[in-house]
Image: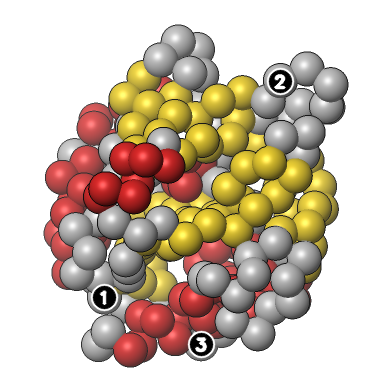
């Protein structure tokens, strides 16, 4: 069973429905015990970085989420849930994230419409398991004003970080994989055929670990 962490942010129902569509049981939960007992954990979300971290703390979910990032189970971060994996964000002043991936979340600079909303290409080069069977340069659906910038040298010291890329005035990591932690800046549950295939790939990863 996949636990979808409910901390008051994000299209939880659409994520749950997408997993049901690919034939994997998933439950939306605010219960840390359910998160601890799950075969895999999904952290979705949209909205403000600081509010999300505060909500996770207020709901008593931070220890369970941190434990889910210890590499023993598959983990999937989506959109804001992806950004929260980084060390910090400059949104409304610097705030601390989960620090699972060394780096900072930055706002898009001038010259492009913000938020970045709509379809854009993602280039993965066959490096990430989430993209098995998905064409390099496939389109995925984005809605975000900030993007993560990994500290490459620190990532190299702490373990392999595989990335897929998108270009929106700046080249940024649209998806990452490090050990059993996977994350996407785009919304796979809103990305039609390619997004469904990506969730099928995550489901396959979950089944392998049972």
Residue 107 percent across, percent down from the top left? 61, 23
Reading the image, the residue beneath label 3 is: 23
User: Which of these two is toward me, 13 or 198?
Assistant: 198
Mark earlier in primary sequence (3, 2): 3
Q: Which residue is mark 1?
A: 39
Which residue shows up at 60% across the image and 58% down it?
164
Query: Is 67 displayed left or right of 91 in the figure?
Result: left
| Mark-to-mark CA distance, 1 and 3 | 15 Å
Q: CA distance from mark 3 to mark 2?
A: 40 Å
Q: Is residue 91 left or right of residue 139?
A: left
Look at 44% across and 24% down and name the residue there: 89
Disc 3 on helix, strand or loop?
Answer: loop
How many numbered discs? Answer: 3
Please report contact status of discs 3 and 2: CB closer than 8 Å, yes or no: no
Question: In the image, what residue occupies the spot 75% across and 44% down?
Answer: 167
Classify residue 185 as left or right of residue 140. Answer: left
Q: Is residue 194 above or below residue 188?
A: below
Please state the horizontal and vertical placement of residue 122, each as a whole percent of the image: 71, 59
Q: Please, is residue 187 above or below residue 39 in the view? A: above
- Quadrant where the N terminus is found in the figure: bottom left
Residue 162 seen anywhere in this rendered image of the structure: yes
Residue bearing mark 2: 109
Residue 194: image quadrant is bottom right
Q: Earlier in the sequence, mark 1 or mark 3?
A: 3
């Amino acid at each position: 069973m996949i636990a979808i962490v409910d901390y008051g942010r994000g299209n939880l129902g659409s994520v749950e429905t997408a997993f049901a569509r690919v034939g994997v049981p998933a439950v939306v939960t605010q219960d840390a015990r359910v998160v601890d007992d799950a075969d895999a954990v999904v952290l979705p979300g949209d909205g403000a970085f600081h509010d999300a971290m505060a909500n996770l703390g207020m709901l008593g979910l931070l220890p369970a989420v941190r434990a889910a990032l210890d590499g023993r189970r598959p983990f999937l971060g989506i959109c804001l849930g992806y950004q929260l994996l980084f060390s910090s964000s400059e949104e409304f002043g610097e705030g601390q994230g989960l620090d699972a991936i060394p780096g900072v979340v930055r706002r898009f600079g001038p010259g492009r419409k913000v938020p970045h909303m709509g379809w854009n290409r993602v280039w993965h080069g066959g490096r990430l398991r989430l993209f098995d069977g998905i064409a390099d340069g496939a389109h995925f659906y984005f809605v975000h004003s900030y993007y993560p910038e990994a500290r490459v040298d620190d990532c190299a010291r702490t373990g392999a970080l595989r990335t897929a890329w998108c270009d929106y005035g700046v080249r940024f990591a649209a998806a990452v994989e490090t050990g059993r932690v996977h994350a996407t800046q785009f919304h796979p549950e809103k990305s039609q055929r390619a997004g469904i295939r990506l969730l099928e790939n995550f489901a396959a990863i979950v089944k392998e670990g049972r």
